[in-house]
Structures are given as structure tokens and as C-alpha cells.
Image (cartoon, grey):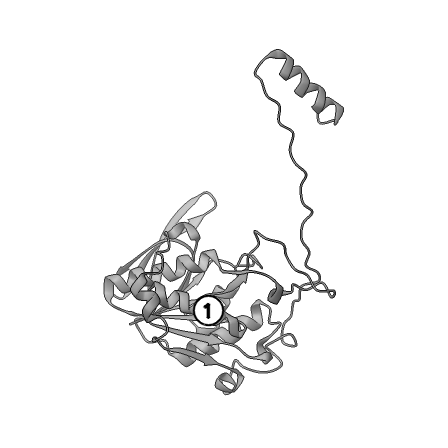
């Protein structure tokens, strides 16, 4: 049994967003982190490993520096890592990305009792499309927005988060699950894990590795094969410092009312 986890390295949006002259993000000039929802997916896979002894394989599509992130996930407890990286894959939108990742997962191999985990969405795009698109292209049953996952034989019982509640679903393996960050608290890297992470296998899938798959076509991957594109990226304007009023007497209330009235808020 395997748990395959799709993980994305994203810009650290708590800092300044670097933008090129053409309006696209300059990812090379920005600090990066592991996408939050994807870490929940990794933890879900590791918990499944703790319970069943399954193998955990982490997969990421990105530039060569994403290897550092994958090594951190190996230090957390993943067994293998695959970096999907090639110039032909650059500029892919969600449709093209799902084509490439689906081909990579097929290359890894999905057996009868395997589970594919994805994060709900990436903080740089917020589309929540890649996971479901991968499931469709691999012809796998899927459950999105998982807030709890339990293994029962060859099926998973999933608590699916909704806007006004939740629903309980049971899905047979192989299947794909997208995880919300509320699902769990990701574990830290362990000291033995840090020592071992560079001895664990990390394989690179490039264009030549995947080009024979029916999903990989230069007309359906990369910038050329992307039906959508980002028109412009920019940093939101920095908000000014707030005004603090101290006191709990009538004079302070009158002062607050005067300020709000002067700004035509009331």
C-alpha cells in the first residue's frame, strides 16, 4: 500500500510579493514555504503510515530548488520523493499542472489499495482545482475538503467539511482525498529524520521521463497548453497604522463619535 502526496512550494505571502515587469511573480526573488494545506495532506499520509505501515511518496512539480522542501518532508517521515521539473512544464495553469502530475502519479504507480492525498488549495492560486482534476484524469473516486480521515479495510471514511456543517462519506481505494489544514497538526522533522533524509531516494521526473504518457503533449502542458493565465500580480497596498483611543469614559466615547462622524462613517 502507498500513500502518494502532492505538495507545492509556494511564495511566503507574509512577505513582499516580488513582481516582474510583465506582471508575473518573480518566484526566484521570493522566500518560499510549503503550502499549508499540503502539509496537512502529508501528515494525513504519515498517520496512515503509522497505522498501516504503508509507504509514503511525496511528489512536487517545481524548479530544482524545490528539492530542499522535499528533503524536509523526507525528514518528517516520508519514504520517497519525486520532483517533477522541466522547462517544458513552466507556466502551467491548473489544467496543465494536473496533466503533468497525473502522468507522474501514473509513472509512480497506483495500486488497488493506494491513496492519493492533496491539499485543498494553494495559497498562491486559491483555485482548489488541481486535486480534483488529477482525480478525473486518473479516473479515481475523490473526496474534497477532508477534515477527518479514517482507514477501514480497503475503504476510507471521510468527514467532508461544508460551509454550514459536514457530511460523512465512505470511499473505496484507490481514491484521491483533498485535505483542509484543520484536518490535523503536521509533525515536526525529527533529528533522526534529518540525518536520514539525504539517504532516502529522491527521483527527478523531467519531460523525457513522462513524454510517452498520453497526458503529456506540448499542446496541453506548460504555458502553451494552459487555457488560463495570470493577467497581473501585485502586492496589496500597505495599510496605515491604526488609531488607538484610551479610556472608558464619556469623553473618550464622544471623541470616537466625533472621529467617525468626521470620516462620514456614521
Element marked by disc 1: helix
Instruction: Write the residue at 46% across / 75% down.
Output: 83
Decide which of 101, 235 is in the foreground and name it: 235
Left or right of 67 in this view: 156: left
Q: Judge left or right: residue 59 versus residue 255.
A: left
> What percent of the width, then of the height, locates residue 224?
66, 77
- Report the residue that reaches farthest toward the top: 250
**Residue depicted at 59% across the width and 13% down the height:** 249
Q: Position of residue 211 (x, y in %)?
A: 52, 86
The quarter of the picture where the C terminus appears is: top right
Please tell me which residue lies in front, 193 or 82: 193
Instruction: Please name the residue shown 26% across and 62% down the image.
Output: 50
Q: In the rendering, at what x and y percent does residue 52 appear? A: 24, 65
> Which residue matches tag 1?
68
Residue 39, relative to residue 92: is it above or below?
Answer: above
Residue drawn at x 68%, y 64% is 24
Residue 6 position in % (x across, y down)? 44, 67
Q: Quadrant of residue 18?
A: bottom right
User: In the rendered picture of this protein, how many numbered marks are placed on residues?
Assistant: 1
Amino acid at each position: 500500500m502507498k500513500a502518494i502526496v502532492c505538495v507545492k512550494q509556494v511564495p511566503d505571502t507574509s512577505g513582499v510579493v516580488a513582481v516582474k515587469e510583465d506582471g508575473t511573480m518573480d518566484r526566484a526573488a521570493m522566500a518560499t514555504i510549503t503550502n499549508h494545506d499540503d502539509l496537512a495532506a502529508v501528515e494525513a499520509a504519515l498517520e496512515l503510515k503509522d497505522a498501516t505501515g504503508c509507504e509514503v511518496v511525496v511528489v512536487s512539480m517545481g524548479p530544482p530548488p524545490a528539492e530542499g522542501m522535499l528533503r524536509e518532508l523526507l525528514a518528517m517521515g516520508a519514504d520517497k520523493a519525486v520532483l517533477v521539473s522541466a522547462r517544458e512544464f513552466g507556466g502551467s495553469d491548473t489544467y496543465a499542472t494536473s496533466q503533468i502530475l497525473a502522468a507522474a502519479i501514473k509513472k509512480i504507480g497506483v495500486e488497488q489499495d493506494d491513496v492519493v492525498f492533496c491539499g485543498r488549495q494553494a495559497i498562491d492560486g486559491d483555485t482548489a482545482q488541481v486535486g480534483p482534476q488529477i482525480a478525473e484524469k486518473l479516473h479515481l473516486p475523490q473526496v474534497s475538503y477532508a477534515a477527518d480521515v479514517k482507514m477501514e479495510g480497503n475503504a476510507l471514511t471521510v468527514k467532508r467539511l461544508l460551509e454550514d456543517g459536514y457530511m460523512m462519506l465512505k470511499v473505496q481505494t484507490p481514491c484521491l482525498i483533498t485535505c483542509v489544514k484543520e484536518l490535523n497538526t503536521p509533525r515536526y522533522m525529527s533529528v533522526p529524520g534529518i540525518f536520514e533524509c539525504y539517504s532516502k531516494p529522491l527521483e527527478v521526473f523531467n519531460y523525457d521521463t513522462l513524454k510517452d504518457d498520453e497526458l503529456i503533449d506540448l499542446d496541453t502542458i506548460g504555458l502553451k497548453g494552459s487555457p488560463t493565465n495570470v493577467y497581473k500580480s501585485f502586492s496589496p497596498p500597505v495599510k496605515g497604522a491604526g488609531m488607538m483611543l484610551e479610556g472608558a469614559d464619556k469623553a473618550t466615547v464622544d471623541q470616537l463619535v466625533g472621529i467617525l462622524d468626521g470620516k462620514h462613517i456614521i
